[in-house]
Image (tube, rainbow, N blue to C red):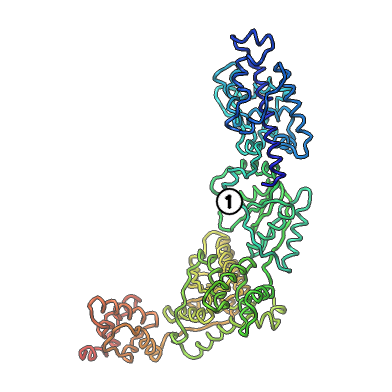
Amino acid sequence: MSAHHAAWQAENDRFLAVALAWLRLRLERRAPPHPADAPRARAGDPPGSVWDRLRGRGRPHPAHGALALLPPFSGGSLDEQIDEAAAELKRFESAQRLPALLELARLFGLSRFERDLLLLAAAMELDTRIPALCAAAQEDPAKAYPTFALALVLFDEPLWNALSPERPLRRYRMVDPVPLPPHPLSASPLRADERIVNYLKGLDHLDERLAAVMRPLPGHDTGLTASQIPAAERALRAAAGERPPVIHLLGADAETRQVVARQVAAAFERPCFRLAADALAGGADLDTLTRLWERETVLRPAALYLDDDDAAGEAAEHALARFAAACPGLCFLDARDPRLPGGRAMTTVEVRRPTAAEQRDAWAQVLGEDEGGAPARLAGQFDLSLPTLARVAAQALADDGGDPAAAAWEGCLAATRPGLERLALRIEPRAGWDDLVLPAPEQALLRQVAAQVAQRTRVYEEWGFARRMNRGLGINALFAGESGTGKTMAAEVIARELRLNLYRIDLSAVVSKYIGETEKNLRRLFDAAEDGGAILFFDEADAIFGKRSEVKDSHDRYANIEVNYLLQRMEAYRGLAVLASNQKEALDPAFLRRLRFVVEFPFPGPAERRRLWQGVFPPEAETHGLDADRLARLNLTGGSIHNVALNAAFQAAHQGTPVTMPLVLAAARAEFRKIGRPVAESELRWAEPALGAA
């Protein structure tokens, strides 16, 4: 606590002590004299009255220690003491910094009567002698609480509309009548809000009901890059008006949007709080929160950051928009498609991530330039905000492994995973090029795909192709072939080669029957994948990329829109998008023309099947008498060969024997039945002599 604030706190305590003493004196004057003290009361001798003994002159108060600092007033009669206390209170009105009660009355435009009414309600929390005095003043032992009727006769210049819902005391929830049937409003107990009572005592903190749904906006010390400063300046100009509009922040970089909001709020010396849409979905009273925040911005100016995380439901998004429309003061709205009711003005500011060159420079400052060009590779592959980049870099430098560049790459992979983990299944790449059994042309085509992903930054940025092209910068491929021919393994091989995250997306789960939901699911998916340029593997692509039908109704029209939207996002996606389909002929020809690569995965021939059988059993697995040449005659795909080998291994483990030809043959018969193909004994009869020999 600063010395200046400590001095003000002492003066505020003194003011409260005088104000409470003034209030007690007025309550005593209103109370009828005690029968035993009537002669003295008539003689004007207040020290002998029973109400003077109730007031406990000079006794420290347990609820507020500052009252002990108040000496007895020197006047003789109650009226003289009241005048003396009023004169003492008048002195505080000329202070350079007003006491809390006077400052609150100024901020909200309270009349003198409303200020006194608020003091009466708050006194119940500040002085334990007030209840008895209220009961005496109302001549009813059961009414040991303040009421509006008591205030009307207790204070000067009464206002009958002081507790109107449109007047400040009730509009801003400073004083609330507590319903007490069958009493009317004027006879109901008055209760001062806890936040207001604490404010009067000099304790300035966020209201607990607001604190339950709001948090201070996280701070980042990384600042802004040169390309981001214009966005912050635009937001600052918008916030400088007398009635600033809602500042709508757009862009893919959530952390930088928050940095901009914090910097603008700091320019006006205001704290900034974050309210998420999902907090409003929990059943919060929106009208009450709106009034409480409006009151809070008057008590201490603050900024609000309304965050629609795109995962909240439609009801929460609508509630957030309503709150933004009614929210006074400086308000930032982080939402993709806001629709503010009530016609409140809104200014849109787009906040972009740092450019690739700026990210490269940031990496170079941390890692230094090296012969391998690690800063360029990191900036080319990952699109990070400066706060995220700084965290990853700090962890990489703290790593004792000895290679900060490698640690930074792994840190970037980890940092970009959380957004996709909720939307897709991550596949840990384990297969290498030696595990992939394909004809040479297809192998070469897959290596070309990997090479384009690795070199896209050099070609697009350094060689200037991105400046001449506004579409088609994404790298996409179709893997077509029967199930089990190696499409997923090929994606694993590329991901392992490039050291990238691989996510499998089931398009049949992404497609929704509700209009607009498919596009929303795809948008979330691609937005989350952009940060790390992950490899997206769309399985069962024919579920959405089937031949577009003639438009006969609205469902056909929206189905075609979904296909077009996915094509556009794939072309704009900076990473690699791989579509897998078992039925290439079912795909729309127009869609095929827009793909950069189409890789056919043929049914493996005898030579490929022999290689598959030779490598399907790990070196640790115990085998006996297996003949790869004979097994290659089984007309199975690589996926089926893997299943046969695994089932045979489990059976061998159960029997306690090595994996033998009879076990493989039994597993093969089961696999043929599973895939719906008839068991061709002619294909299996070749094995009988070998089985007999075994």
Q: Residue 288 vs residue 350: left or right?
A: left
Tell me, yes or no, if residue 336 can be seen here.
yes
> In the image shown, does 220 or 505 lie closer to the viewer?
220
Residue identifier under label 1: 316
The secondary element bearing badge 1 is classed as helix
Above or below — where is 679 with respect to 503? below
Q: Residue furthest left?
A: 692
Residue shown at 73%/34% (left/top)? 102
Q: Residue 211 vs residue 503: left or right?
A: right
Above or below — where is 507 with respect to 16? below
* Residue 483 picture quarter: bottom left
> In the image shown, does 406 or 287 lie closer to the viewer?
406
> In the image shown, does 404 or 594 lie closer to the viewer?
404
Image label count = 1
Above or below — where is 333 with respect to 210? below
**Residue 248 image offset from top left, x and y in percent:** 69, 56
In the rendered image, the quadrant that contains the C terminus is: bottom left
Q: Residue 128 vs residue 618: left or right?
A: right
> In the image shown, does 40 or 555 lie closer to the viewer?
40
Tell me, yes or no, if residue 118 can be seen here.
no
* Residue 489 picture quarter: bottom left
Above or below — where is 133 with respect to 527? above
Residue type, mark 1 in image: Ala
- Crowding around mark 1 (Cα neighbors within 10 Å: few <14, some 14 to 19, many 20+) is many
